[in-house]
Image (tube, grey):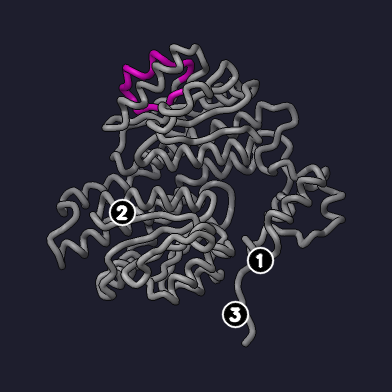
């Protein structure tokens, strides 16, 4: 039987030597993404940051019937736990989703790197699980293979993607295709928003069949707050733009950054460091707060910045301790906090203040400076281009095809 026809979204250029040779004129990542080259701000990445608030709103307009079907299938098939699977940004999204579902539904929710699920000896109870495959392209090879394994082992497989008619969609019983297509950066929030909605739908349906999860009124309040998150994101990105640019310019001369965070902001820290590496070629690492305090004090230096993602709640005292450590060492420190913060802000060199929102929805706002600051680090570099991951150089174009062989992403 021939392979079913799917929409290819591969980043590979199939080792086309002529594409590498012309990379200075047409960087190979632009060529793979079918985008016209840009040479100055605003780059395509910047447009995607601005566009994602609208796309989040569009995703929330279409998720309801899909969420109803997924929640009903979970209950009808007697599933008891949820596993989120993805790679790269989709792995960070998996961690964010696991936080949401654990808190909203009271169901055990875990996350795994799709490749590690295949390569390690980790054991999962697939017959009792809903397994959610996350891939912006819908064709990430390891995510597809993991969902196939889970389906064959008895799991309920569900896909959350940004392109329809892709391999991951074909492997799954149910799927949601987020708006915007496969592009830059927006694919995190455009899938996280409908996943939050799905969590509330599952909790509400479970409430009708069992005595568990949030009280109904709290779920309705969360849904109401979620319905306003796109407009809040739009307001936030406009208000922090200039500040993020200033911070990016200040970070450029430094050697590296570490991003301490905990709770549902830890996946945001991982995402921020991925963007530092991809957009700005700037070494960075996201670490849990306590892990950082236990082992990284000697790591900080005058040319290594700490970027603290701090929010009210049980993680805040640890964020405050990190700020005190940087002050004692006189090392660079940036903090992203909610409006009204008075304890961490006086201890830092730079501060980004975000509007107050529902604690479960904080990642939507913290992701904005997590994207914009790395963007501006690269924009501040002479000749910098955050869109292309250095693929204006032939050797990086060749390396990109080694990293992303045909039909692998």
Which sits earlier in the primary sequence, circle 1 or circle 2?
A: 2
Extreme residue toward the front, this view: 121
Q: Nearer the viewer, mark 1 or mark 3?
A: 1
Give the number of the disc on residue 101.
2
Extreme residue toward the bottom, this view: 1
In the depicted view, which residue is nearer to us: 120 or 267?
120
One can see residue 235 in this view: no
> Contact (CB < 8 A) between labels 2 and 3?
no
- Secondary structure beneath dot 1 equals loop
Residue at 71 percent of width and 33 percent of height: 384
- 115 versus 227 height, above or below: below
Residues in magenta, as a range:
334-350
- 268 versus 161 height, above or below: above
Say if the magenta span includes residue 66.
no
- Which picture quadrant has residue 34? bottom right
Residue at 35 percent of width and 22 percent of height: 320
Between the C-alphas of marks 1 and 2, the distance is 31 Å
Give the number of the disc on residue 4.
3
**Residue 95 in picture, x, y percent from top left:** 41, 49
Say if the magenta span includes residue 339.
yes
One can see residue 249 in this view: yes
Extreme residue toward the left, this view: 211
Which sits earlier in the primary sequence, circle 1 or circle 3?
A: 3
Question: Taking 138 as reference, is 405 left or right?
Answer: right
- Secondary structure beneath dot 3 equals loop
Badge 1: few (under 14), some or many (20 or more) residues near its Cα, within 10 Å? some
Quick one: quadrant of the C terminus?
A: bottom right
- Secondary structure beneath dot 2 equals helix
Q: Which residue is mark 1?
A: 407
């Amino acid at each position: 039987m021939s392979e079913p026809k799917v929409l290819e979204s591969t980043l590979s250029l199939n080792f086309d030597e002529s594409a590498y040779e012309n990379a200075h004129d047409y960087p190979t990542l632009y060529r793979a993404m079918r985008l016209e080259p840009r040479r100055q701000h605003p780059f395509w990445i910047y447009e995607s940051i601005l566009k994602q608030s609208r796309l989040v709103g569009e995703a929330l307009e279409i998720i309801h019937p899909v969420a109803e079907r997924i929640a009903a299938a979970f209950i009808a098939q007697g599933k008891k736990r949820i596993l989120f699977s993805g790679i790269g940004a989709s792995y960070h999204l998996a961690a964010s989703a696991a936080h949401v579902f654990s808190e909203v539904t009271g169901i055990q929710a875990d996350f795994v790197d799709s490749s590690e699920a295949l390569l390690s000896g980790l054991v999962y109870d697939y017959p009792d699980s809903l397994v959610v495959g996350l891939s912006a392209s819908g064709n990430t090879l390891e995510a597809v293979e993991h969902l196939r394994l889970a389906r064959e082992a008895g799991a309920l497989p569900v896909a959350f993607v940004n392109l329809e008619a892709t391999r991951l969609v074909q492997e799954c019983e149910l799927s949601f295709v987020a708006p915007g297509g496969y592009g830059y950066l927006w694919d995190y929030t455009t899938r996280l928003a409908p996943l939050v909605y799905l969590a509330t739908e599952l909790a509400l349906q479970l409430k009708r069949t069992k005595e568990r999860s949030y009280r109904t009124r709290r779920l309705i309040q969360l849904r109401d707050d979620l319905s306003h998150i796109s407009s809040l994101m739009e307001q936030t990105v406009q208000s922090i733009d200039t500040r993020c640019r200033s911070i990016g310019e200040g970070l450029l001369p430094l050697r590296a950054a570490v991003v301490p965070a905990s709770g549902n902001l830890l996946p945001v820290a991982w995402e921020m460091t991925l963007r530092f590496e991809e957009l700005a070629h700037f070494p960075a690492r996201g670490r849990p707060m306590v892990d950082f305090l236990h082992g990284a004090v000697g790591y900080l230096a005058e040319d290594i910045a700490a970027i603290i993602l701090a929010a009210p709640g049980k993680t805040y005292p640890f964020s405050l301790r990190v700020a005190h450590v940087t002050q004692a060492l006189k090392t660079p420190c940036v903090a992203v906090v909610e409006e009204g913060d008075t304890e961490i802000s006086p201890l830092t060199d730079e501060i980004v203040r975000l509007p107050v929102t529902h604690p479960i929805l904080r990642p939507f706002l913290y992701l904005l400076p997590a994207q914009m600051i790395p963007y501006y680090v690269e924009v501040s570099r002479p000749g910098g281009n955050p869109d292309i991951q250095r693929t204006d150089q032939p050797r990086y174009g060749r390396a990109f095809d080694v990293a992303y062989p045909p039909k692998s992403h």
